[in-house]
Amino acid sequence: MAGRNFLFIPGPTTIPRRVQNAINVEQEDMRALDLPEFTKPLYADMKKVFKTETGRVFIFPSSGTGAWESAITNTLKPGDKVLASRFGQFSHLFIDCAKRLGMEVVEVDCEWAVGTPADKFAEILAEDKNHEIKAVFATHNETATGVMSDIKAVRDSIDACDHPALYFVDTVSGLASLDFRMDEWGVDLAIAGSQKGLMLPTGLGILCASEKALEANKTAECPRCFFAWEDQIATNDLGYFPYTPPMNLLRGLRESMNMLFEEGLDNVFARHTRFATATRKAVEAWGLTTIAKEGWQSDTVTAVKVPEGFDGNEVARHAYRRYNLALSITIGQVMGQGFRIGHMGDMNEIMLMIPLSGAEMTMKDLGYPIELGSGVAAAQEYLCSTAKDRI
Ligand SMILES: *Cc1c(COP(=O)(O)O)cnc(C)c1O
């Protein structure tokens, strides 16, 4: 078939050619004499992406889910109370992971259209006078519903009652696309993966731990081996690893960070906000809404709500079957209620036109009451009026 398969799902995202080339290197010796010259700056630069001076980065050959497991098992003990909310498939799985590892989760169920409820958390933490809650979980960007949480607001809730709980943040679909400030927001465990904002293949679970989390590690009682921090600390400090590292992905990560720093992290964030705004203008012009409520909409993924009587899954199926375009279905509790457009990572204006135009053609084919060109034009208007020369 002629042409490309265009990937506009909210992770994995498109891999830039520069990153793809960086990954495509000869197999190398993970004990090479000069390896620390590569690994030490790699870890130091990863801290800049998390915006931390005092945190420590861990990189595991895994996916984001492994970084969840590592964060929990290295800082808590079975039976510990964890405060978490469920408002989408990923916040649900975060809770599920904690439960399966033996934690007792205080669950706050929210509508699958909003994010981490900072005010509700403030009430619960204020009542926890004996500090039985050892950790608070937030999901920075709920990829399943296209919802963004206010990570600083949750920190403020914890601080309002001087609660000592560790603050865990899943930023798998936020880091390197949405502003994230580990130190400033007092995040103790920041969890990420390689295949979303970092524009790499799946295969790295990336975690950043604060000094407080590193202290908790010394008394954590969960069994752990592959994801243990102690072994990483002992070897990473010398520029090496406790087991065979995925060297090609680390070479890719180097190039991905080079690209992020060349553009400037703040410019990267502004670009994501701009493309998300353009996407939302298209949705509005289609006469549709997002699954996320006003004020909660994500800047990396838009979940478009389909009208009554339509099946969102069919949009993704038809787009792929007929136009070789990968849009995403909505998952979990909101399955079938919409479809998702990923606008995360390596994107420019023209690339954004692809999923918007493709979604429009698809909806037209499926009998949606939309006008061809309407969403695309609304997005174009906004992009043209906010564009700047590239060079
Ligand atoms: C993708 C994602 C995960 C899971 O990451 P995997 O790499 O698939 O294990 C967790 N949380 C969020 C918010 C995600 O988007």
Image (spheres, rainbow, N blue to C red):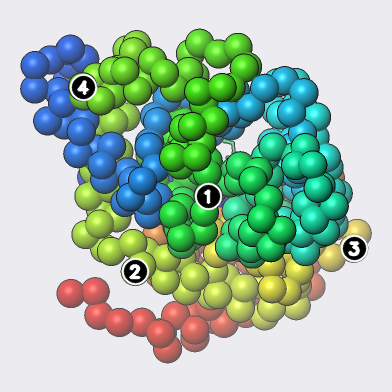
Going by the numbered disc 1, the residue's amino acid type is: Val
Q: Earlier in the sequence, mark 4 or mark 1?
A: 1
Q: Secondary structure at mark 3?
A: loop
Is residue 259 at all visible to an observer of this figure? Answer: yes
Q: Earlier in the sequence, mark 3 or mark 1?
A: 1
Can you identify the residue that label 1 sits on? 187
Q: Secondary structure at mark 4?
A: loop
Q: Residue at x 21, y 22 (%)?
A: 238
Q: Secondary structure at mark 2?
A: helix
Q: Earlier in the sequence, mark 4 or mark 3?
A: 4
Residue 387 versus residue 211: which sits nearer the camera?
211
Q: Earlier in the sequence, mark 4 or mark 2?
A: 4
The span from disc 3 to disc 1 (Cα, nearest Å) is: 40 Å
In the picture, which quadrant includes the N terminus? Answer: top left
Q: Quadrant of ligand 1?
A: top right
x, y percentage for residue 66? Answer: 54, 26
Of all residues, the one furthest to the bottom in this rendering is: 385
Going by the numbered disc 3, the residue's amino acid type is: Glu
Is residue 142 at all visible to an observer of this figure? Answer: no
Graded by Cα atoms within 10 Å as few (under 14), some (14 to 19) or many (20 or more), the crowding at tag 1 reads many
The span from disc 1 to disc 2 (Cα, nearest Å) is: 23 Å
Can you identify the residue that label 3 sits on? 308
The span from disc 2 to disc 3 (Cα, nearest Å) is: 38 Å
CB under 8 Å between discs 4 and 1: no
Q: Which mark is residue 238?
A: 4
